[in-house]
Image: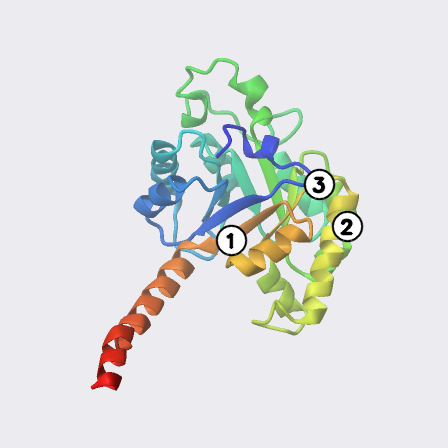
Amino acid sequence: MSGKTLKQSLRPDSRLSGFWLSLCSPTVTEIAAGSGIDWLLLDMEHAPNDLSQITDHLRAATSAAPDAQMVVRMPSSDQTMTKRLLDIGVKNLMFPMIQSAEDARRAVAWTRYPPEGLRGISATIRANNYARQTDYLTTYTDVQCVIVQVETPEAVDQIPAIAAVPGVDAIFIGPGDLSSAMGHTGNPMHPDVQDKIREAVDAIHTAGLPAGILGYGADLARRYFDSGIEFVAIAGDAWLLTRQMDALVQTMAQPSPTLTQQTDKD
């Protein structure tokens, strides 16, 4: 991790690797943050992380890496959840299933205090170090990163309008839902889906914003980075654990090569 905020790090030609965390374990978050990864995403949409757990994850990440960049993907794009996550100190938010510029404008408004937005004010919150940070109300947007997800062909078509909304800092492509919406459920590598992803990336870059995507595994992650995508989720905690456990079990089920060679000699 660089010591910069995620907003500062997301620049053209950056290659920021991330881990997607869904196991609801602060210990896993702590281990992942200590790896030197550029960013972490804590998933509330497709994992049973609830609001009361999020602070523990934030503390776990910063205990391992003081400049850890934690993104939280909300369970849905919702005003009250946005406010509560920001109040406990989440700086980087991902809003799922943004379909239009109006969706993006609403999301940004929920992150801003009046008159720029609709976020309600509470004076003593974790985000302002329990009122010790006296300039919080005038500086909070400096470190805040608003990421919106496009997950359908219709949303891809709306990228120029979505990206033009002030306060949108990055756009993240959801390949799973995109492939499903295109009639290729479970096959984000289908040529038509990959063409649509390239179209989305081109539109995001034309608008001057960084693009992100899920791309598990070194080969796919490198492919996406080499195509110009700035931030890629290179693995998930559950995905990594499953693959490594399965691979080790399969390896140990095979005879030792040295034993096999000795048996052949006998």
Give the mark nearest the N terminus, 1 or 3. 3
Amino acid type at image mark 2: Ala
Residue 184, above or below 122: below
Residue 76, position as x, y percentages in the image:
53, 51
Q: Quadrant of residue 260?
A: bottom left
| Residue under label 1 | 234
| Residue under label 2 | 203
Residue 63, position as x, y percentages in the image:
34, 32
Residue 50, above or below 68: below
Question: Where residue 143 is drawn, which disc sits there?
Answer: none
Q: Residues within 10 Å of mark 3 (few under 14, many from 20)?
A: many
Give the mark nearest the N terminus, 1 or 2. 2
Position of 11 with respect to 252 (left or right) is: right
> Considering the numbered disc 3 on the image, is that residue within a helix, a strand or a loop?
loop
Distance from Cα at disc 1 to Cα at disc 3:
20 Å
Residue located at (35% from left, 68% from top): 247
Is residue 131 visible in the rendered image? The answer is yes
Position of 207 with respect to 54 (left or right) is: right
Q: Among all residues in the image, which is located at the extreme front?
A: 265
